Image (cartoon, rainbow, N blue to C red):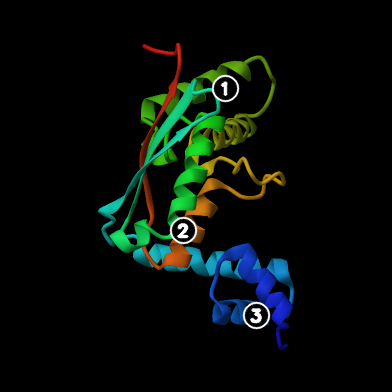
């Protein structure tokens, strides 16, 4: 099925993918725009996985200061070349990450950064909450794992729903994967720090 120029344009606006990639995605999805977005997302993730071993030593430290100057964020985002670090897509990602961290206050970049003892402590808290319920152990374990997934989606930057997507469908990881696919380089959110006036040790 041939894709219309309007569909290609709309898909490009939604994903930032190239014309040929958009045509391929629309052909695979038989003209379904949402299906084409999903196809491009999966393709981008597959390509990102291939780039996972490459080193990302360039990049920027972005700063975001919220209106009123009471809340600020520094975030380090890495890529493979200085050229990509200067692109609009990369710079926009850094800004979006700064706003996300300011608004959603994550504790970690990814779930792999959470110390095992923190995750275990959460499990124990959930187990305590369910102690008086007469449920089989396997059901309790499933509930605990579900609660732990929710904890990850709140505490891990990459797993949080993106604040500027009202539908809640886009995760921060999807933003990073999108820039990864667009630039052809490995993009890594290295670290961040969030400052709130009056908040300290």
Q: Residue at x 51, y 31 (%)?
A: 102
Quarter holding the C terminus is top left
Residue 28 image label: 3
Judge depth for marks 2 and 3 and give the one in front.
2
Instruction: Bin the neighbour count of mark 3 within 10 Å (Cα to Cα): few under 14, some 14-19, many 20 and up.
Output: some
Judge depth for marks 1 and 2 and give the one in front.
2
Q: Quadrant of residue 103?
A: top right
Residue 80 seen by the camera: no
Between disc 1 and disc 2, whose residue precedes?
A: 2
Q: Secondary structure at mark 3?
A: helix
Q: Is residue 198 positioned above or below 13 on the image?
A: above
Q: Residue at x 56, y 64 (%)?
A: 41
Q: CA distance from mark 2 to mark 3?
A: 29 Å
Instruction: Bin the neighbour count of mark 2 within 10 Å (Cα to Cα): few under 14, some 14-19, many 20 and up.
Output: few
Q: Residue at x 32, y 63 (%)?
A: 83
**Contact? badges 2 and 3 (CB < 8 Å):** no
Q: Which residue is mark 2?
A: 88
Between disc 2 and disc 3, whose residue precedes?
A: 3
Q: Secondary structure at mark 1?
A: helix
Q: Which residue is mark 1?
A: 126
Residue 130 x, y percent position in the rendering: 63, 20
Q: Secondary structure at mark 2?
A: helix
Residue 96 x, y percent position in the rendering: 52, 45
Q: CA distance from mark 1 to mark 2?
A: 43 Å
Residue 145 x, y percent position in the rendering: 56, 35
Q: CA distance from mark 3 to mark 1?
A: 44 Å
Residue 199 seen by the camera: yes
**Contact? badges 1 and 2 (CB < 8 Å):** no
Residue 121 x, y percent position in the rendering: 45, 21
């Amino acid at each position: 099925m041939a894709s219309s120029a309007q569909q290609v344009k709309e898909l490009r606006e939604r994903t930032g993918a190239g014309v040929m990639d958009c045509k391929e995605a629309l052909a695979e999805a038989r003209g379904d725009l949402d299906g084409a977005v999903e196809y491009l997302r999966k393709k981008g993730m597959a390509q990102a996985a291939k780039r996972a071993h490459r080193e990302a030593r360039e990049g920027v430290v972005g700063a975001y200061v919220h209106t009123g100057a009471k809340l600020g964020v520094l975030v380090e985002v890495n890529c493979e070349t200085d050229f990509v670090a200067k692109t609009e897509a990369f710079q926009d990602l850094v800004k979006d990450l700064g706003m996300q961290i300011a608004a959603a206050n994550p504790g970690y970049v990814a779930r792999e950064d959470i110390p095992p003892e923190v995750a275990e402590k959460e499990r124990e808290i959930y187990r305590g909450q369910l102690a008086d319920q007469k449920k089989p152990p396997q059901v309790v374990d499933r509930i605990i794992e579900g609660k732990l997934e929710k904890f990850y989606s709140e505490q891990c930057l990459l797993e949080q729903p993106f604040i500027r997507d009202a539908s809640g469908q886009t995760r921060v990881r999807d933003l990073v994967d999108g820039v990864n696919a667009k630039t052809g380089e490995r993009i890594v959110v290295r670290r961040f720090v969030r400052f709130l006036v009056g908040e300290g040790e």
